[in-house]
Amino acid sequence: MADGPILVIAGGAGFIGANFARYVAAARPEWRLRVLDKLTYAGDRARLAGVDAEFIAGDIADPEAAASVLAGARWLVNFAAETHVDRSLQDAQAFLRTNVTGTFVLMSAAGDAGVERIVHVSTDEVYGESHGQAFREDDLLRPRSPYSASKAGGDLQVLALHATYGLPVCITRGANTIGGWQHPEKAVPLFTINALLDKPLPVYGRGEQRRDRLHVDDHSRAVLSVLERGEVGTVYNVAAGNNRDNLTVVRAILERLDRPESLIRFVEDRPGHDWDYIMDASRLAGLGWQPEHDFESALNLTVDWYVEHRDWWEPIVSGEFRRYYDRQYGQRLATSEAYRP
Ligand code: NAD
Ligand code: DAU
C-alpha cells in the first residue's frame, strides 16, 4: 500500500468510480486510495480487483460512516449515486436519499474533516434537453426525470456549501459514459449482451434520441484534471462530441459482433425520454483536457470488453437482474415492432 496523501473515492465500486480508481492507482502510485461504497445492486468489489485501495463498506448518507472514512484524507471524489433513469421511474426514493441527502451529508463531513479539495461527479442530464444547442456550465438546470432532478438537487447543495462555508469543491458534469465494467442495465452493455445471447435488442421509441458517448478513461482523466487543476466553486462539463442517435449505436454494435439487424425491436418509449444533451466542454479544455476516444474507438473498446468478460456479466444477468429485466421489458417486448431498414 502506498503511503502518500489519501484520496477518498466514494462510489468507487461502481462503473466509473472503479475505472477512476484503477486509472489513478497507475497515474499517481504514491497516493493512498480509500474507497467508500454501499455495495448496492450496482456496486461490485470485483471491479477493484488488482487495484491497491483500502475498501470500506458504508453509506454516504450516514454521517458517522462519512466522518470516519474522511479522517486524514486530503482529497475526495464523489461518484456514489443511484444512476439508472429507468429505475428512477419505477421508484425514486433511493435516488432522493443518496443523490440529494447523501451528497449533502458527505460534503458536510468533508468540510468538517478539512479535506483540501473535492470533486463532485454529476451529469449532463441536469440541464435537461438541449435540442441541438450546446449547454454551458452557467445555463439553467431543467432536469426532467426523477434521476436527473435528484442529481440537480445534489449539485445545488454542493454549490450552496461552497457559497456558505467556502467548501473547496468543483463539480464535473459528464456525458453518457461507456466502457468496461458498466452494469448490464445500461443501454450499450444491454444491447451488446443481448446480441451476444441472440436476444432482441429493445430500442425505446424509434431510436432517434441522441447521446454523447464518452469513453470512461476520458471521463477519469477529466475528473483527475479537475481535482488537480480546477478552480474551486466551478462546474466543468465533460463532453466528447461523440453525439449519435440510439439506432446508429445499436446498428454499430450488431455490425461489430456480426449479428443480424433483425434482432432490433422498437419498444414502448421511456416516459419523458430526453431527446439529447449536447455540452460545450471548452472550460475543461482550458485545463488541458481533450477526449482521446472518438465514437468508433469508445464503442468498439466497450463491445470488445463484453465479448471478453462473460465471466463477469453472465452471473449478473442470470441473477436478480432477471426480475428487473422482466418488469422493464416483458410487456414492451410483447408489444414491440421489428426494425425494417
Ligand atoms: P454506478 O451505478 O455504476 O455506480 C454507483 C456506485 O455508487 C455503486 O458502486 C453503488 O454501490 C454506490 N452507491 C450507491 N448509493 C450509495 C450510497 N448511498 N453510499 C455509498 N455508495 C453508494 O454509477 P456510474 O455509472 O459509475 O456513475 C457514477 C457517477 O457518475 C454518478 O454520480 C453518476 O450520476 C455520474 N455519471 C454517470 C454517467 C454514466 O453515463 N454512467 C455519466 C455522467 C455522470
Ligand atoms: O448522460 C449521462 C447519463 O447517462 C448518466 O447521468 C446516467 O447515470 C446514465 O445511466 C446515462 O443515462 P441514459 O438514460 O442516457 O443511459 P441509458 O443507458 O439508460 O440509455 C441510453 C439511451 O438508450 C437513452 O436514450 C435510452 C436508450 N435506451 C436505453 C435502454 C436501457 C434504449 O433505447 N433501450 C434500453 O433498453
Image: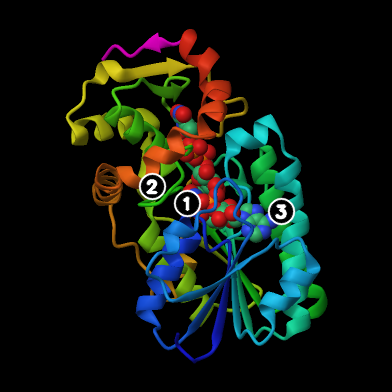
Q: Amino acid at mark 1?
A: Ala
The local crowd at label 1, few if under 14, some if 14 to 19, many if 20 or more residues have their Cα within 10 Å, is: many
Residue position for label 2: 213
Give whichever of discs 3 and 2 has the lower sequence position. Answer: 3
State how far apart marks 2 and 1 are (Cα): 7 Å
Contact between marks 2 and 1 (CB within 8 A): the answer is yes
Q: Position of residue 18 (x, y in %)?
A: 46, 62
Q: Is 306 located above or below residue 56 in the figure?
A: above
Q: In screen coordinates, is 32 left or right of 96? A: left
In the drawing, does residue 152 fall left or right of residue 237?
right
Q: Residue furthest left?
A: 258
Q: Which residue is mark 1?
A: 175
Between residue 323 and residue 135, name the one nearer to us: 323
Nearest the camera: 107 or 124?
A: 107
Q: Which residue is mark 3?
A: 98
Q: Please, what is the three-letter code of the amino acid marked with disc 3? A: Thr
Ligand 2 closer than 8 Å to the CB at disc 1?
A: yes
Q: Residue at x 67, y 51 (%)?
A: 151
Residue 149's quadrant in the figure? top right
**From this viewpoint, is residue 143 visible?**
no
Spot occupied by residue 278 in the image (x, y as percentages of width and height): 47, 47
| Residue 146 image point, x, y percent | 69, 39
First in sequence: mark 3 or mark 1?
A: 3
- Please name the residue shown 64% across and 58% down the image: 38
Q: Is residue 340 magenta?
A: yes
**Residue drawn at 40 percent across, 69 percent down:** 22
**Colour style of the rendered protein structure:** rainbow
Q: Which residues are magenta?
A: 336-341
The reply to whether callout 3 and callout 1 are in contact (CB within 8 Å) is no
- Mark 3 CB lies closer than 8 A to ligand 1: yes
* Magenta run includes residue 246: no
